[in-house]
Image (tube, rainbow, N blue to C red):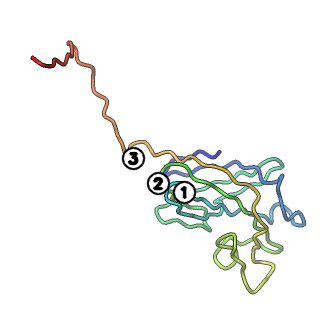
Amino acid sequence: MIQAITETAFNVYIQTEDNRIDTSVASTQIRHLIKFTNDMDGSVQYVYGNTETIYDRYTYIVLGYAPTPNMYGGQIKLFPAGYWKYEVYEVSWIGTVTVSAGYAPADEDDVLSPVANDKGVVQGLVTKGKMYLAEKDGTEQVQYTQRQEPSGTNYIYYGQ
């Protein structure tokens, strides 16, 4: 499970190498497209990692926050707080890896044409799970004010 806070950057540690699809290219030729789906309203957002490092046992991805999201730059604006589903898709390149519009697929069904070595191809789903997105301190929808305990007795009398 991924845990994050609204309006902040967050780190993602996910297991992708166990389910890797395209083993014909080096891990440096692989990027991951992440699809977030909100549990309450069903809204969907896609993003590539701001930075991504594939290790033997896991993949480390940094996602940034921006008021104006940039899916290719790794910046996302997830709202509202709560539970989100995530799906991680493997995208591979034969030639130069370029994560930008026209060179990296925008969603899991996007097929870029004309086909070229410098254009990414979605290989398939490698992992999925849940993310809990907590509200940033001070921005909660419901806020409580802590009051000091009264020094005297605090009785409520009824019926007098």
Judged from the image, the secondary structure of the residue bearing numbered disc 3 is: loop
Residue 15: give x, y in percent of width and height: 76, 50
- With 4 as the anchor, is 140 left or right in this view? left
- With 13 as the anchor, is 156 left or right in this view? left
Judged from the image, the secondary structure of the residue bearing numbered disc 2 is: loop
Which circle, 3 or 1, is nearer the viewer?
A: 1
State the CA–CA distance, disc 1 to disc 2: 8 Å
State the CA–CA distance, disc 3 to disc 2: 11 Å
Q: Which mark is residue 80?
A: 2
Who's the residue at 84% across and 62% down the image? Answer: 21
Q: Which mark is residue 38?
A: 1
The relative height of residue 53 versus residue 68 in the rendered view (above or below) is above
The residue most toward the bottom is 114
Which quarter of the image is occupied by the C terminus? top left
Which comes sooner in the sequence, label 3 or label 2?
A: 2
Which circle, 3 or 2, is nearer the viewer?
A: 2
